[in-house]
Amino acid sequence: MNDKRSVHTRILEQYVEDQIPKLQTIPQGELNLSAEKISLDKIASHTEMTQDEIVDIFRLSLITESLTDQYSETYMTGARNHNAHWLSNYVKNFWEPDEMGHAQPFKTILMDFGIDEYRLDESIRDAIQQSEYHVSHSSGFHPTSLTTYGLIQECVTDYWYELQRGFFPTGSDASKLVSKVKGREALHTIQFRNMTAIQLESDPSLIEEIILATMNFEMPANHIPPVKHIEAKTQEWLPKMNGNVTELLHRIIKHIYEVLGDRKSLGKLLTTYASKSEQNFISYLPNHILSKAIEHINGGYGIVGEIVMDEIGLKTEEIHNPNSLVENAEYRLKMIIKSWASKKMHLEGLLHKPEGKISSGIN
């Protein structure tokens, strides 16, 4: 096992080394908007949102992107504790310098909205002083937990910025600014996904770390006092921004499925997550009971994985016809469970917290 792990460690180290040349900070000269001022009134007239809500959406992005140092320290703590030099190399030499330029585009847009720069800087200082993200982080400090957390967080952020970009005309300077940041978040999503997959391949038991990170996942803004109240509104804003929770789930689960590699592992992750956190996975049935039942059905986790993938529009492999009486009985039982669960499944419950709503804000 040690030899196998050392091989995968070298693979991770080489993967990170291959990513370093892809670092692209946003040049200061590309952070300017055209002379024509962005009209908040015009933007609001094409949405169901107020001008204050639109300002808050961009304020949320600005503030959360301004705490990169604190997120970086969270990753570095896990890297140091587990001697994961590949992770510290990635964070210090790629992710952190890449992220450092992500706040300015949102500041530029807010200033064009008419918000005073001094007020914005003051808000950033307050957020930094009032927050200690590495203390609040709840998704675990094992490298696998951290890369899983990074995968989900960056995937959510990528989608959030995609929706923000939609406020502006295609090809406009403001749209290009948001697109620059969005593109980097999409790359980070893939990088974290690949690093998680390499670790899982080296040790399949690390699926427990992936479950831990998923079960306890919260976006950073939940722990930043000046914007926590804005973060709480993000789910209700999604449809007003021409987005929806199902599409976000589709993207997150697609990436997680690519890490895990099969429906059975996906089903295990989702049922364990639903059971431990008592999320509303299948209506009217306590999830700890459901989880135990699925665990004892041959192929039960695979059924759950298949149901979820079907529900969000991801293709699954065709189910082979049973070849014996026993297989036929199992097949019929699975189809009954699948039909019943598909009708009662409440997918949004997978990302709801008992005390709150889905986190759709960022870093």
Image (spheres, grey):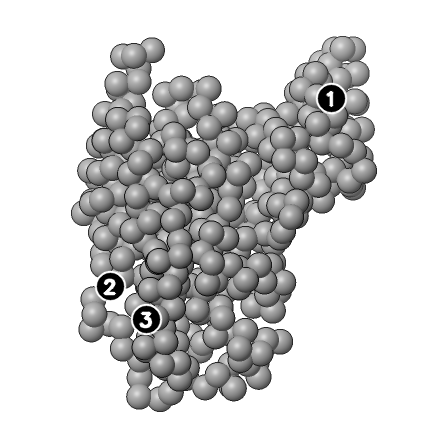
The amino acid pointed to by label 1 is Ala
Q: Is residue 76 visible?
A: yes
Q: Quadrant of residue 93?
A: top left
The numbered mark, 3 or 1, whose residue comes first in the sequence reads 3
Q: Residues within 10 Å of mark 1 (few under 14, many from 20)?
A: few
Give the residue pinned by disc 1: 293
Q: Residues within 10 Å of mark 2 (few under 14, many from 20)?
A: some
Element at label 2 = loop
**Label 3 with label 1: CB-CB less than 8 Å:** no
Element at label 1 = helix
User: Which residue is painted at 33% across and 11% down in the image?
Assistant: 1
The numbered mark, 1 or 2, whose residue comes first in the sequence reads 2
The amino acid pointed to by label 2 is Ile
Q: CA distance from mark 1 to mark 2?
A: 51 Å
Residue 225 is situated, as x and y percent measured from the top left of the image, at 47, 58
Residue 309 is situated, as x and y percent measured from the top left of the image, at 61, 39
Mark number displayed over residue 242: none
Question: Left or right: where does residue 266 sit relative to residue 67?
Answer: right
User: Which residue is painted at 40% across and 48% down in the image?
Assistant: 133
The amino acid pointed to by label 3 is Asp
Give the residue pinned by disc 3: 121
Residue 191 is situated, as x and y percent measured from the top left of the image, at 34, 42
User: Which residue is painted at 59% across and 52% down in the image?
Assistant: 358
Q: Is residue 310 visible?
A: no
Give the residue pinned by disc 2: 26
Q: Quadrant of residue 129?
A: bottom left
Residue 189 is situated, as x and y percent measured from the top left of the image, at 39, 46
The numbered mark, 2 or 3, whose residue comes first in the sequence reads 2
Q: CA distance from mark 3 to mark 1?
A: 54 Å
Q: In this orientation, which residue lies closer to the viewer: 74 or 125?
A: 125
